[in-house]
Image (cartoon, rainbow, N blue to C red):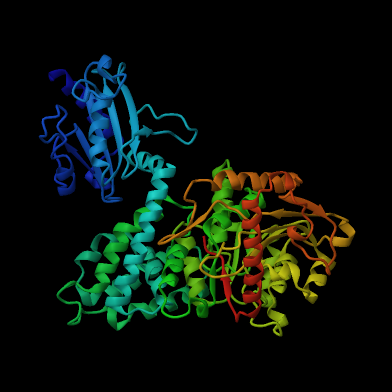
Amino acid sequence: MANERKTEKLVRSHLLALDYSEENGVLVEEQISEIAKVRSLLSKASKNAKGNGGYPEFIISSNKDTAFLIVFECKSNVKRHESPTRNKPVQYAVDGALHYGRYLAKNYTVVAVGVSGSTESEMKISNFLFPAGSTEAKDLVNESGMPVAEIISYDDYYRLASFDPDVARKRHDDLLVFSRELHELIWTKAKISEEEKPLLVSGTLIALMNQTFMKIFDQLPTDELQDAWLTAIKKELDKADIPKGKKDTMLQPYSAIAVHPNLGKPDSRTAKEYPAGIFKEIISRISENVWPYINIYHDFDVVGQFYGEFLKYTAGDKKALGIVLTPRHIAELFSLLANVGPESKILDICAGTGGFLISAMQHMLRKAITEEERTDIKKNRLIGIENNPKMFALAASNMILRGDGKANLHQASCFDDAVIKAIKKLKPNVGMLNPPYSQSKSDAELHELYFVKQMLDCLDPGGLGVAIVPMSCAISPNPAREELMKHHTLDAVMSMPQELFYPVGVVTCIMIWIAKKPHAKSNRKTWFGYWRDDGYVKTKHKGRIDLYGSWPAIRDRWVEMYRNREVHAGESVLAKVIPEDEWVAEAYIETDYSSLTKESFETDLKKFMLFNLMLEIQAGNSKEEMVDEA
């Protein structure tokens, strides 16, 4: 036991060298904990199976994410590092760390660290990860997939743990649950409108970027909180590289929330339950449940996620809001299809909350080598237009939360000649689009394909434009089809899952165009893909999710098929088409009869009937706006 003190001293010195301190928001506790939940979980965690409590040598927590812990178990002799069966926690360091990690993982994501050796040179370290709710540990690995064999900083532990697929999935699920709870709180206690709810979330996240506000908001008098909230937002906007006119446009929606009467002093309905005020309660919950998420998952449109979740609980007909949200995995797919990299310059003329731009940015940053490239990507290579002022505020706040991409966001119509002229000078070479629906068949100027044409006209010659549009764009006659082919080449069309936008019944396809290369002159066959199964399934409370983890393999196969223009029976085909033709795989693809069974025939027949029914419904729908949300 005395020699174990040497090992503990070594660990302690490593932690000090890596800035594990309360000044940095990290709490290091030794063989005891002041956290009630931790004490409860370890109350029966005795290593000798006598049912009494037990504690590891070190328990590390942080206010950055109260649902994440690091525990250390030490042994002086390296021969006592790890047993073959890992079930002897009294004698071995790894076994002991896993023992405590398993108890704590009932409520926490836990990194369990086994350390042995009494000198620096012989010191042996093993790191394991328990995703919250799991009883099985896995090696903690770095970005290259190699096990981590040293003590690393808190931020590095947190980052590596967070990107474990099981941890990421659990945290995303937790975020969805919280969004439902937050909706209920805002709606029943604060009576905030549907349009203002996502602004309340995004504004709070920006305010929490301000370190002063983050530290003092829970101590402020109720009647000062709204002013302090707006002041914090203003200060963060002043730090951002945004022209004054755009800052004023952003601030206007937040200013309205800052004087909302229901967020002021508690009334008789809420005073007993929330004596400090409902606004402080909302900020506290967002700080605890959302801020840690947004700090680590930079490729995820968190604001858009809340926007979509809030819409699910809108009273009445959700379609009356005109919103159809693009799923996150489709935003990711766009970046892969366009093969974006540091040299890409991305344009989204209907940016919504910025989901496509955020996804593209992260793909570009992953391929960047130098810091100069990363700065260039953030400052110069993301271009967006959004007409709706409130949606523009959400998009800009999304980019601010990631510290990048604000300067080239424009609040304007994508048909504004002055804005389009300015954007063409920036020479974008990749376009991504999820356009608004046309109001009616007679409203030709607002047809989805004219938005596609406007996007392509902004791109450099040879640039790639990717758009997700209603299937009717690919099969119904329209003058825009001829105009598009006159100036651009239809490179590919992919038929997407029929319930991709569930619960909204819109059938879609992805079109890929080569900008400013006339289709007839290119004499290029169009590649058609039958991408009806993305592996996602409908669930009762979560909507369509990748329940079985099959999406990554499906995604990679789809991308490879498109890039290589592969032709497979029943999956893909090459065909020459003109404006009058149907631009869908179903019109040209050959059926693979070798795998046909009675059951599959009946299933496909039902899908075909459902497809036709949904097209009929879609043709009669009133205006629905598609906004690109991850």
Q: Residue at x 69, y 48 (%)?
A: 596
Left or right: 127 with respect to 96? right
Residue 459 visible here: yes
Q: Nearer the viewer, residue 23 or 382?
A: 382
Q: Which quadrant is the N terminus positioned in?
A: top left
For the question of whether residue 163 can be seen, the reply is no
Residue at (22%, 45%) from the top-left corner?
A: 22
The residue most toward the bottom is 442
- Please indicate whether residue 344 sits to the left or right of residue 100 in the image: right
Q: Quadrant of residue 350?
A: bottom right
Q: Give the image quarter of residue 316.
A: bottom left
Q: State whether residue 470 is above or below residue 462.
A: below
- Residue drawn at x 73%, y 65% as measured from the top left: 456
Measuring from the top left, give residue 360's x and y in whole percent.
58, 54
Q: 423 and 627: which one is in front?
A: 627
Percent x, y of residue 508: 64, 65
Q: Position of residue 300 (x, y in %)?
A: 48, 55
Q: Could you say where residue 260 lies in the image, as x and y percent from the top left?
A: 32, 81
Question: Image quarter for residue 52?
Answer: top left
- The vertical placement of 146 against 495, above or below, is above
Number of marks drawn: 0
Q: Residue at x 36, y 64 (%)?
A: 179
Q: Is residue 627 left or right of residue 264?
A: right
